[in-house]
Amino acid sequence: MAASLRCFLRSGKVTVTVRDALNQAMDEELERDERVFLLGEEVAQYDGAYKVSRGLWKKYGDKRIIDTPISEMGFAGIAVGAAMAGLRPICEFMTFNFSMQAIDQVINSAAKTCYMSAGLQAVPIVFRGPNGASAGVAAQHSQCFAAWYAHCPGLKVVSPWNSEDAKGLLKSSIRDDNPVVFLENELLYGVPFEMSEEAQSKDFTIPIGKAKVERAGSHITLVSHSRYVGHCLDAAAVLAKEGIECEVINLRTIRPMDVESIEASVMKTNHLVTVEGGWPQFGVGAEICARIMEGSAFNYLDSPVTRVTGVDIPMPYAKILEDHSLPQIKDIIFSVKKTLNV
């Protein structure tokens, strides 16, 4: 196993950080398919702003690991054109907040071309980078783009939580013939997670569009994505001590959304709480609420669906205000008890 993985052995299981899982996924796909290349700001000689591409430039050189100018519209357009020409670019945004500079390329050039060409022109590209709030970077650098990009037909939108998610879903995204928006989380990069023996294989992938039940439960369903899956599991552990068993679903993919898994869980637990770091209006949780209302699971609900979201304001800079602007474990616990009327 490559030294750059920085794995740790614990009781026979391999523990890998999300950063190194992403690095491993790109390394394996660059090695597997010569059409794959990575471009973005500081991805090459500096090893990436967050060191996700550590070692790749030294291994693959200037042709396949490309440092770009600070011009998101420019290098995103180059990447889309390369995808149309038959390559498989990985386009890194230093943060997805900067993707707003390139949103015309992502939406109008990448997402719509397959449809507008009657399926003749594929655009196999991955737009990846950190998404959502980090710490102390204020309003312009703290947005969650899950709902923004999931609103657009033609895109697949992926939002991993742990290291297995990161590796398996990134490999599937690179191999996909459609444009994929791959939303990482900066605060998760250095977090170690156990990785199964299966996930260590170069052939390991996770199908896009399939959620995962991270914890089984019978009283209430918690649905989340990215960093807040961990918050839900922490809240579920606290609530279990009070006799409340939560089923926690890791969405993994925002579009296409695995509504069937959510419905199956709701039919079992009869209660639903959605948790996300984005704003409430037209958010991921709002879409889940609508899909449950319109589907067969609605008749199984014993109480209204509750949403736990970021506060409906631009992100404040002060830490105490920032903490109050994002979902906390206590907010999830409060919403679960409110939904269950206990």
Image (spheres, rainbow, N blue to C red):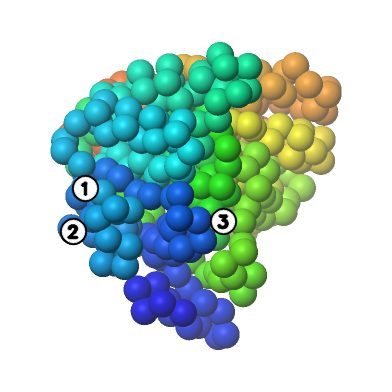
State the separation of the CA atoms marked 1 and 3. 25 Å
Q: Could you tell me which secondary element the residue under label 1 belongs to?
A: strand
Q: Is residue 106 left or right of residue 241?
A: left
Q: Secondary structure at mark 3?
A: helix
Residue at image coords 74%, 44%: 219
Quarter of the picture holding the C terminus: top right
> Where, by quadrant of the figure, is residue 303 drawn?
top right
* Residue type at the position of mark 1: Asp
User: Residue 289 in the image: x percent, y percent?
Assistant: 64, 22
x and y, in percent, of residue 253 in the image:
58, 39
Q: Identify the residue at horizontal 62%, vertical 43% (top origin).
A: 208
**Location of residue 222 in the rendering, given as x and y in whole percent from the top left corner:** 62, 41
Q: Which residue is mark 1?
A: 67
Tag of residue 45: 2
x, y (%) of residue 313?
A: 31, 21
Residue at left 68%, top 50%? 213
Q: Categorize mark 3 by other alpha carbons within 10 Å: few (<14), some (14-19), many (20+).
A: many
Q: Nearer the viewer, residue 293 or 256?
A: 256
Give the number of marks: 3
* Residue highlighted by disc 3: 168
The three-letter amino acid code for the residue at tag 3 is Gly
Which amino acid type corresponds to the residue marked 2 in the rendered image? Gln
Q: Earlier in the sequence, mark 3 or mark 2?
A: 2
Camera-nearest label, 1 or 3:
1
